[in-house]
Amino acid sequence: MAWVLLVVAGLLEVGWSIGMKYTDGFTRLVPSVFTGAGIVASMLLLSYAAKSLPIGTAYGVWVGIGAAGAAVLGMVVLGSLSPPPGSSSCVCCWSPWWG
């Protein structure tokens, strides 16, 4: 169950990190409320998962899901392709998983 909570927490992290794009510096009420709720829910689920998983593992998986998901959604959905230094750093970070 802890792993399920951790994956959901990671997906919520993707949601709130993308949601920050729509808050305009937390000046827009509705996106700010949803983003804030996503932050709180993500942290709560991470803390529940960390009760039975090692914190290093839980935090690493949570950050990994959030960072990778936000980068992919940012590039694919939002069309925010980064300049070559940013793109190459994504390739370097993700290349160990490609074999």
Image: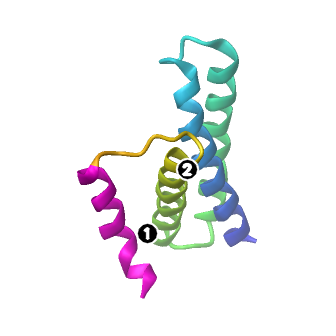
Residue 86 horizontal side relative to residue 81, left or right:
left
Which residue bears the numbered disc 2? 76
Residue 85 horizontal side relative to residue 3, left or right:
left
Name the residue: 51% across, 41% down: 79
- The circle on residue 11 is none
Magenta: predominant secondary structure element?
Answer: helix
Q: CA distance from mark 2 to mark 1?
A: 30 Å
Q: Which residues are magenta?
A: 84-99
Whichever of labels 2 and 1 marks the residue nearer the N terminus, that label is 1
Residue 34 horizontal side relative to residue 56, left or right:
right
Locate residue 53, reporting x and y percent.
58, 73
Name the residue: 47% across, 52% down: 71
Locate residue 90, reporting x and y percent.
36, 61
- Quadrant (top left, top right, bottom left, bottom right) of the C terminus: bottom left
Q: Nearer the viewer, mark 2 or mark 1?
A: 2
- Near-viewer residue (40 or 63): 63
Residue 8 horizontal side relative to residue 19, left or right:
right
Which residue bears the numbered disc 1? 56
Name the residue: 66% across, 58% down: 48
- Examine the structure image and report whether residue 44 is included in the region drawn in magenta: no
Above or below, 54 against 26 in this view is below
SS type, badge 1: helix
* Displayed quadrant of residue 95: bottom left
- Near-viewer residue (4 or 53): 4
SS type, badge 2: helix
The amino acid on which the numbered mark 2 sits, given as a three-letter code, is Val
Point out the residue furthest to the right here. Answer: 1
User: How would you rate the neighbour count of disc 2 (Cα within 10 Å): few for under 14, some for 14-19, many for 20 or more?
Assistant: few
The amino acid on which the numbered mark 1 sits, given as a three-letter code, is Gly
